[in-house]
């Protein structure tokens, strides 16, 4: 269309692949992935290793816009690096959205004016010339720097000064220009668009409809060009991913002194929680009786990473260092909540009935699949969990009765069915013992992965009581640990600086600040 100020093409991340993050982080030095010295010392040789923040100052509009562009570039580059399925799609707006209504009306007005002008006697070519001029610029944008011959030909055929002169004399060959444009598009387009070009060549529509279709195909070709560039850029970004993302974030931090506020609160909350849970130690050399053990920097950061899984991102803002992975974190969190609910239901069923349904893997699989389907989408704000669990209870009772009667066991009594329904529906309560047990053990599982230098070996080692969701936990664990490893490789120096200030500042969370041994502690790890 002749309106280049439309919203940009929408981003489509496709299906996230945890291995994408892992493959990128594996290219980094393995010591980085194991809380390396470099990540937690302030004397790195790398230019961007030691984070710094600018003092508070009043920002100009240009500085704010530049910072926003840096953040946008960082998010865009990160998506390319971690998700090999990432690509851009032509804009697809919701059918009933206000933006779509406005855009469609503006476009319709342009095409109506164009049709009216071409049908005048003699024809008017004002809008047609602007149309051809934009098509020329789009075609030129597709050319490689060395395509001088094609560039010259386009400029000669779509010579706007000549076309304006022809228009004044009513001698513009619109049909011939359209034919040349379609032929040129056929030379430039990707093979996947050959069928679209063929339809344009065979079109018998009027000129206005033909040009509308030409612009539609040009939009597809623009998306193809961008995606081709992304595919070629991805290996380069992956080789330089850590330095690039760290430098971009430092650039944002230099312009916006508050760019680490949420990250600082996130780490501070983890530190305070550890101090609150610390057991008072006996009097030791250099410490008074009853002092609380001070957590080490790695313990603080591990606790912070674990809290990401259970945080409510709608109520508590995500740390700035995690915003580029917000979609992936939310998906892991949603999948985890659903898997936990499925596990809780199955634990209740097997603890209630025991022997008659033990050792039946086919029954267990059916109950699991059925429960998963009925709880699908439970993260949605409009999802009624209690109602869904009522349906789960009814279906489970039907499956159990069918299995029991097939094996000559008595069917469930109405009282037993009511008891089962009540127990299953009670998992909506936060203090439900089954729910508390499952959530605690899930956290134990992820904590073990976060703290282990070689977490891949522990993906299949789930705590007792979580066997029913072992495959799902292993998949989510692999994705989450890959994100954590990549995140701390990039932002480790920033985290180290924050932890150092929190633990050894004049007003640390602890009542009695310890000596600054962070660097020695990290080095020993």
Image (spheres, grey):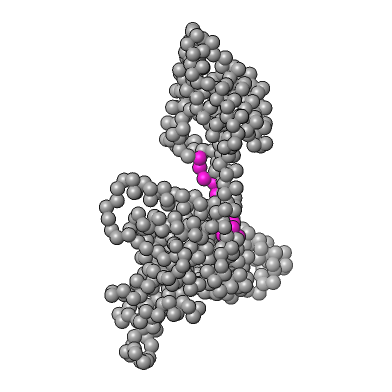
Find out whether residue 443 is within the magenta segment. Answer: no
Given residues 268 and 311, the one toward you in this image is 268
Direction right: furthest residue: 407
Where does the image place residue 485, in percent across and percent down from the top left? 53, 66
Q: Compared to 159, does 356 lie above or below? A: below
Given residues 273 and 66, the one toward you in this image is 66
Find out whether residue 11 is within the magenta segment. Answer: yes
The region drawn magenta spans: 9-22
Q: Compared to 298, does 396 lie above or below? A: above
- Observer able to see residue 326: no
Where does the image place residue 385, in percent across and percent down from the top left? 49, 57
Where does the image place residue 149, in percent across and percent down from the top left? 61, 29
The part of the image, by quadrant, that contains residue 126 is top left
Direction left: furthest residue: 58
Q: Compared to 112, does 504 lie above or below? A: below
The residue located at (44%, 71%) in the rendering is 40
């Amino acid at each position: 269309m002749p309106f280049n100020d439309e919203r940009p093409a929408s981003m489509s991340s496709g299906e996230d692949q945890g291995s994408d993050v892992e493959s990128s982080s594996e290219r980094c030095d393995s010591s980085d992935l194991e809380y390396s010295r470099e990540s937690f010392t302030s004397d790195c040789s790398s230019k961007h290793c030691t984070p710094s923040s600018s003092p508070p100052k009043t920002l100009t509009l240009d500085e704010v816009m530049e910072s926003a562009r840096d953040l946008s570039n960082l998010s865009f580059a990160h998506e390319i690096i971690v998700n090999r399925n990432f690509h851009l799609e032509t804009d697809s707006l919701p059918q009933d959205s206000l933006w779509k209504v406005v855009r469609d009306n503006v476009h319709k007005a342009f095409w109506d004016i164009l049709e009216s002008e071409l049908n005048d006697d003699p024809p008017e070519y004002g809008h047609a010339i602007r149309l051809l001029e934009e098509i020329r610029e789009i075609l030129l944008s597709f050319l490689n720097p060395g395509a001088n011959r094609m560039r010259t030909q386009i400029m000669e055929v779509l010579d706007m000064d000549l076309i304006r002169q022809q228009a004044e004399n009513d001698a513009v060959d619109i049909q011939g220009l359209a034919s040349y444009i379609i032929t040129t598009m056929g030379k430039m387009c990707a093979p996947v668009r050959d069928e679209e070009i063929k339809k344009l060549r065979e079109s018998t529509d009027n000129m206005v409809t033909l040009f509308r279709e030409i612009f539609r195909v040009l939009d597809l070709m623009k998306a193809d060009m961008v995606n081709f560039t992304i595919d070629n850029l991805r290996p380069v970004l992956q080789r330089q991913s850590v330095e690039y993302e760290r430098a971009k974030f430092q650039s944002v931090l230099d312009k916006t002194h508050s760019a680490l506020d949420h990250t600082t609160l996130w780490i501070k909350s983890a530190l305070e929680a550890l101090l609150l849970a610390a057991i008072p130690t006996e009097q030791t050399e250099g410490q008074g009786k009853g002092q609380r053990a001070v957590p080490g920097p790695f313990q603080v950061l591990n606790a912070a990473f674990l809290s990401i899984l259970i945080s409510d991102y709608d109520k508590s803002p995500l740390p700035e260092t995690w915003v580029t992975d917000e979609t992936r974190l939310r998906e892991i969190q949603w999948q985890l909540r659903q898997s936990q609910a499925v596990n809780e239901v199955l634990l209740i069923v097997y603890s209630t009935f025991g022997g008659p349904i033990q050792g039946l893997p086919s029954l267990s699989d059916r109950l699991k699949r059925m429960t998963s389907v009925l709880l699908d989408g439970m993260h949605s704000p409009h999802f009624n969990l209690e109602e869904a669990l009522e349906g789960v209870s009814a279906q489970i009772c039907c499956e159990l009765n069918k299995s029991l009667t097939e094996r000559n066991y008595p069917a469930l009594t109405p009282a037993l069915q009511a008891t089962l329904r009540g127990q299953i529906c009670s998992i909506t309560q936060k203090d439900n013992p089954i729910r508390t047990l499952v959530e605690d053990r899930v956290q134990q599982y992820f904590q073990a992965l976060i703290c282990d230098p070689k977490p891949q070996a522990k993906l299949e080692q789930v705590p007792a009581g979580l066997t029913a969701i072992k495959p799902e936990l292993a998949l989510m664990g692999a994705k989450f640990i890959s994100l954590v490893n990549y995140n701390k490789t990039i932002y480790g120096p920033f985290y180290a600086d924050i932890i150092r200030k929190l633990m050894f500042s004049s007003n640390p969370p602890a009542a009695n600040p310890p000596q600054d041994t962070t660097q020695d502690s990290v080095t020993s790890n």
